Image (spheres, helix red, strand yellow):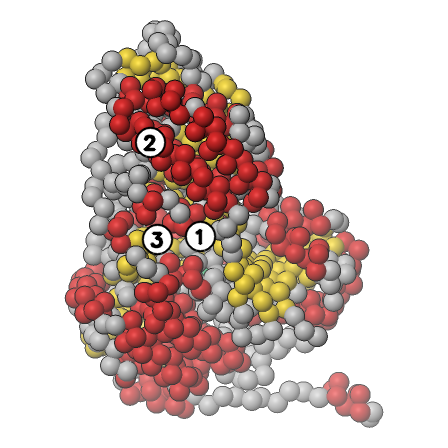
């Protein structure tokens, strides 16, 4: 036998990790765990426990307390009581606690890795080399944020008591992503781990005890979905951070809409893995192994859609199949296996059912003849070829080791296919041409793009989605921001409730062309042109003393639809250079200054002379300010501890629907529309109901300032009615709604459909004259989303 033949015939031996210490730890706890509330383990108030099992054998590991609403109450009360003393600590003291946690995670790293693998079924190689080191890194990184908080976030305060709900695919890592920034920002926490994987969270609770973290700062309540729901709905919680399925994300959005809870959602994905013909194909294949077979594909950002350039499809797919045949499935504690167990039978059935549906829709299923364990929940690595882009397996998250492949011809087609999804979490681009790769990366609608690499994570680099993959980021500066709020905003008084129009019909209005315009005719403004309203109705606009000032057209659903279409077509605005956008805004300020007197005169009839003059003068200054911001709201370049740079870009969100505040017709409009425009969004604005005639002055200004037609559109009408159309429109990417409490609650609950980002005043008073409250970064941050593009360097 030649040496080559010997190598080829050699079998791997087993290399099992010894779970002895972890089993002893479970035994020490008598294989029964309570909740961790106020610094100690406590039995469930209803006395109920559920089992957690090893998915690779189906054997029970321990029983765990089932959280009832009373347990959630107790945990929230403990977190609330701990809040003031925790915040009273110096930033340095909080930093030391986080640092101590990081140290202990490192010291107990092997135990945590084995426990994670036992409870989750993931290969020990992954929990040992990826999950746990990233957990420690997250706490180290956030220990330093705790230290730097006052210098780096002046004027910001923690949200308060934070409810956190995490999934089962990266149990301890998701805990770290949630707890580390929350504590660093000065919040206290109630966390609910997933029912399938509660054990490492309980080991973490012990670490909290070991470092003598003040009781109540971290609380852990176990349980099923109902426990998570009780936490999400709890009135004592100030913020919810959730990672999990888009479906549950939606229900949490709905459940929190009528509260002031801040919300961040990290949801599902169907991430493209794009391979161009000039890619290093062998590296791309290894990338795929990490992209889709890592953690059995149970990864929200898994590279589950292989998009390959047609010219190399055959070669690449052959290489993929060859590599798949060498993947080893087996007991997760074996250090030399690649594919561990699926989390539970229900997930296994879900994967099977989706693959069956894909095949029924025409996909060709290929699985290597790898040896699969006979016990436990396993699914073989799977490739689905000939998949149509509309097939269920190309659109839905399978959350299993299943890769679907499609081909493209040109970079443009690749981008179209890649973006043909409701999700937008991550993407991976493979090309040896940095120009092609970065050009494509810029066009992908995804929160993270890995160039010639995949599944890279670091605490310094934000992670999170576009579109139905959720909103908010975890990691980095933007991740920390999710746990902070401007102090002035938290203390702002409530706006009085506004009167709603009597009839809430779509084409409401009781004066069909009844009263001739006194001052002049104002129209809607769509696609850079004045437009008559579809309804043919108008609304009477009255002055401060009730006198009739004029008639304003009453826009309806169709006008909004036209406006959205126009906004979508105004892509040139997003593509314009920041310098060009700045020039347009400067020109706008110039034109506003020139027409100051006449605008003040008209506005004065509605809001009085003094306010009108101040609105216009501050408006000129604000327009100037956003012209200044347009080319200054830059991103960042991160240096993660691998040979990569991560370019964090502030990208416009897309098309934003803005319902302007009633109280400040001109300044309120400008303060919201301008930050959105400055960073390249297109806008559909509904002007103040109090004085919508301001639209006439505004569109004349826009017309004379070289603004791209369609970049801003104005639809006049009743806020409550037009808000609904904007919030429910799938081509509107975000809704900004500034009104009373009821209106902003509507904005949140109506936006559940495609999970659009919602920015509101929470029904509070904003002093639109104050720069601190009404201008600058806070608005620009809401007008953008961070995309991290990871680029490796070195040979
Ligand atoms: P879920 O979204 O149901 O679970 C995530 C977390 O939310 C768990 O802690 C869960 O509790 C909890 N939860 C469930 N229902 C509610 C509710 N109504 N209110 C508040 N919290 C709730 O994911 P699943 O575990 O059910 O997985 C289903 C599918 O979701 C997977 O097949 C996969 O496609 C996707 N998924 C995506 C993830 C991602 O990171 N993108 C992560 C996990 C799943 P409990 O565990 O007890 O149900």
Label 2: element kind: helix
Viewer-nearest residue: 205 or 138: 138
Viewer-nearest residue: 338 or 256: 256
Residue, disc 2? 615
Note whether residue 151 is visible. yes
Label 3, ligand 1: CB separation under 8 Å: no
Q: Residue furthest right?
A: 2
Q: Pinpoint residue 243: horizontal percent, then vertical percent.
A: 41, 60
Q: Pinpoint residue 736: horizontal percent, then vertical percent.
A: 38, 40
Residue, disc 1? 470
Which tag, 1 or 2, sits closer to the chain's start?
A: 1
Rendered image quadrant of residue 579 = top right
Q: Residues within 10 Å of mark 1 (few under 14, many from 20)?
A: many
Residue, disc 3? 263
Q: Nearer the viewer, mark 1 or mark 2?
A: 2
Q: Nearer the viewer, mark 3 or mark 2?
A: 2
Q: Residue at position x 25%, y 60% from top?
A: 160
Q: Quadrant of ligand 1?
A: bottom left
Q: Residues within 10 Å of mark 3 (few under 14, many from 20)?
A: many
The answer to whether residue 108 is above or below residue 490 is: below
In the rendering, which numbered label is found on residue 60?
A: none
* Total numbered labels placed on residues in the image: 3
Calculate the distance from the C-alpha at mark 1 to the C-alpha at mark 2: 36 Å
């Amino acid at each position: 036998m030649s040496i080559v033949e010997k190598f080829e015939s050699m079998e791997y031996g087993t290399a099992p990790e010894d779970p002895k210490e972890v089993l002893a730890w479970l035994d020490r706890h008598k294989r029964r765990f309570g909740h961790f509330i106020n610094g100690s383990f406590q039995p469930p108030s209803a006395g109920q426990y559920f089992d957690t099992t090893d998915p690779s054998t189906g054997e029970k590991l321990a029983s765990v307390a089932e959280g009832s609403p009373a347990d959630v109450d107790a945990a929230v009360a403990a977190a609330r009581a701990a809040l003031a003393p925790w915040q009273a600590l110096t930033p340095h003291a909080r930093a030391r606690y986080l640092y101590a946690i990081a140290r202990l995670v490192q010291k107990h790293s092997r135990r945590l890795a084995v426990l994670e693998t036992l409870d989750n079924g993931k290969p020990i190689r992954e929990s040992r080399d990826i999950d746990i080191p990233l957990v420690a890194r997250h706490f180290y990184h956030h220990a330093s944020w705790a230290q730097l908080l006052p210098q780096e976030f002046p004027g910001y305060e923690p949200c308060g008591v934070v409810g956190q709900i995490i999934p089962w695919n990266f149990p301890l890592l998701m805990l770290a992503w949630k707890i580390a920034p929350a504590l660093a920002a000065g919040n206290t926490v109630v966390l609910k781990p997933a029912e399938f994987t509660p054990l490492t969270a309980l080991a973490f609770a012990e670490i909290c005890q070991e470092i003598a973290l003040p009781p109540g700062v971290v609380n852990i309540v176990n349980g099923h979905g109902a426990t998570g729901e009780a936490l999400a709905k709890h009135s004592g919680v100030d913020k919810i951070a959730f990672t999990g399925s888009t479906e549950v994300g939606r229900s949490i959005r709905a459940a929190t809409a009528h509260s002031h809870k801040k919300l961040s959602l990290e949801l599902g994905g169907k991430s493209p893995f794009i391979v161009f013909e000039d890619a290093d194909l062998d590296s791309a294949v290894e990338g795929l192994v990490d992209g889709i077979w890592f953690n059995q594909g149970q990864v929200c950002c898994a590279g589950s859609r292989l998009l390959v350039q047609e010219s190399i499809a055959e070669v690449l797919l052959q290489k993929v199949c060859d590599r798949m045949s060498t993947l080893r499935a087996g007991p997760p504690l074996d250090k030399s296996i690649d594919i561990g167990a699926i989390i539970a039978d229900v997930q296994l059935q879900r994967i099977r059912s989706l693959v069956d549906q894909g095949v029924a829709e025409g996909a060709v299923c290929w699985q290597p003849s790898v040896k699969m364990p006979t016990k436990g929940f396993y699914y073989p690595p799977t490739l689905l070829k000939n998949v149509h882009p509309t097939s269920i397996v190309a659109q839905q998250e399978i959350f299993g080791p299943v890769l679907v492949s499609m081909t493209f011809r040109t970079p443009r087609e690749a981008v179209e296919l890649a973006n043909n999804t409701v999700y937008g979490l991550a993407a991976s681009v493979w090309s040896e041409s940095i120009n092609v790769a970065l050009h494509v990366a810029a066009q992908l609608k995804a929160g993270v793009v890995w160039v010639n690499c995949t599944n890279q994570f670091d605490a310094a680099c934000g992670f999170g989605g576009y579109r139905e993959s959720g909103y908010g980021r975890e990691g980095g500066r933007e991740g920390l921001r999710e746990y902070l709020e401007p102090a002035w905003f938290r203390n702002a008084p409530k706006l009085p409730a506004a009167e709603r129009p009597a009839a809430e019909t779509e084409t409401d209005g009781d004066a069909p062309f009844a009263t001739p315009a006194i001052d002049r005719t104002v129209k809607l403004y769509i696609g850079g042109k004045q437009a008559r309203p579809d309804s043919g109705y108008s609304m009477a606009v009255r002055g401060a003393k009730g006198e009739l000032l004029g008639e304003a057209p009453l826009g309806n659903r169709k006008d909004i639809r036209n406006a959205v279409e126009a906004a979508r077509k105004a892509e040139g605005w997003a593509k314009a250079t920041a310098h060009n956008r700045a020039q347009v805004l400067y020109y706008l300020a110039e034109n506003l200054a020139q027409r100051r007197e006449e605008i003040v005169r008209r506005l004065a009839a509605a809001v009085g002379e003094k306010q009108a003059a101040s609105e216009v003068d501050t408006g000129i200054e604000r327009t100037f300010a956003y012209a200044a911001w347009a080319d200054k709201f830059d991103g960042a370049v991160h240096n993660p501890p691998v040979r990569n740079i991560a370019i964090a870009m502030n990208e416009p969100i897309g098309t934003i629907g803005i319902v302007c505040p009633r109280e400040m017709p001109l300044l309120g409009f400008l303060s919201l529309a301008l930050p959105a425009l400055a960073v390249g969004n297109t806008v559909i604005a509904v002007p103040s109901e109090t004085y919508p005639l301001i639209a006439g002055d505004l569109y004349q200004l826009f017309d004379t300032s070289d603004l791209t037609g369609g970049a801003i559109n104005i639809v006049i009408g009743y806020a409550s009615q037009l808000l609904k159309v904007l919030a429910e429109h799938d081509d509107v990417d975000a809704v900004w709604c500034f009104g009373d409490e009821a209106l902003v609650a509507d904005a949140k609950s109506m936006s559940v459909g495609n999970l659009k980002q919602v920015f509101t005043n929470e029904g509070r008073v904003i002093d639109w004259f104050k720069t601190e409250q009404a201008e600058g970064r806070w608005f620009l941050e809401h007008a953008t989303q961070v995309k991290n593009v990871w680029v490796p360097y070195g040979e």
